[in-house]
Amino acid sequence: VFIHEAVGHAVEADHVLEGNSILSGKIGEQIASPLITVYDDPSLHEYGYYPFDDEGAGSKRTTLIQNGVLKSFIHSRETAGKLGGESRNSRAQGYARPVIRMSNTFIAPNGMKFDEMLSELKDGIYLKGSRGGQVNPGEGVFQFNAERGFIVRNGELTTSLRDVSLSGNTLEILNNVSAVGNDLEMNSGRCGKAGQLVPVSDGAPHVLVNRAMVGGSG
């Protein structure tokens, strides 16, 4: 959910042109840890799959972030002409007017196993799943509620936490990533924008973040 809400909406080129993206003007800049690579790929046979978008452009993987560097926004034909880029993400519900939408958006896996990540963490908080939240792509601030949380002590999951949440600044979180797991997991759902719902998938492996604002109760 973080990669869809906090990053994905910020790379939608209509938001960039409207001045409603913290990533505006940052193409080619280091915005995340070098461990972070993010793709949007409508050619993957996940819930957000389509062979052609609703302006007739063929589906193809877009590299959004590569080794921490912002590489591209996602575009319609109109925004691709204005900002430069390739149109692959114009989508509509039924006969509505197409707007820029994500497809299958995910953080690429790296080599670390989950137990190795816990060992490296030593003491901290483990969050899993999402129960929704809020994000402001223009200001780059977010708050997400996790399905489950655990205190980690000496590299082991211990006490469970209730009503646990993660909040902060998108770019700060991305830059504080110190490890990326090898266990990519995709989730499906429907994304709402401009009064339209379209099928999407998002995913990530486990990610280790050095510093983050976490709240909850035991």
Image (cartoon, rainbow, N blue to C red):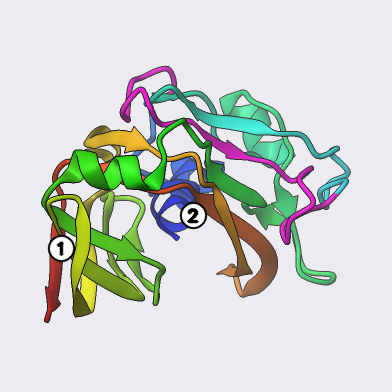
Q: Which residues are magenta?
A: 27-50
Is 42 in front, or is 116? 116
* Residue drawn at the location 81% of the way across and 48% of the way down: 53
- Residue identified by numbered label 1: 214
Tell me the mark number nearer the camera, choosing from 1 and 2: 1
On the rendered structure, is 195 left or right of 151? Answer: right
- Residue identified by numbered label 2: 4
* Residue drawn at the location 26% of the way across and 70% of the way down: 149
* Residue drawn at the location 79% of the way across and 51% of the way down: 45
| Amino acid type of the residue tagged 2 in the rendering | His
Residue 45 visible in the current orientation = yes
Vertical relation: 112 (above or below) 152: above
On the rendered structure, is 152 left or right of 60? Answer: left
Cα distance in 3D space between marks 1 and 2 = 20 Å
On the rendered structure, is 28 left or right of 95? Answer: left
The C terminus sits in image quarter: bottom left
Mark 1–mark 2 CB contact (< 8 Å): no
* Residue drawn at the location 58% of the way across and 47% of the way down: 105
| Amino acid type of the residue tagged 1 in the rendering | Val
Task: Name the dominant secondary structure of the magenta segment.
Answer: loop
> Is residue 41 one of those drawn in magenta?
yes
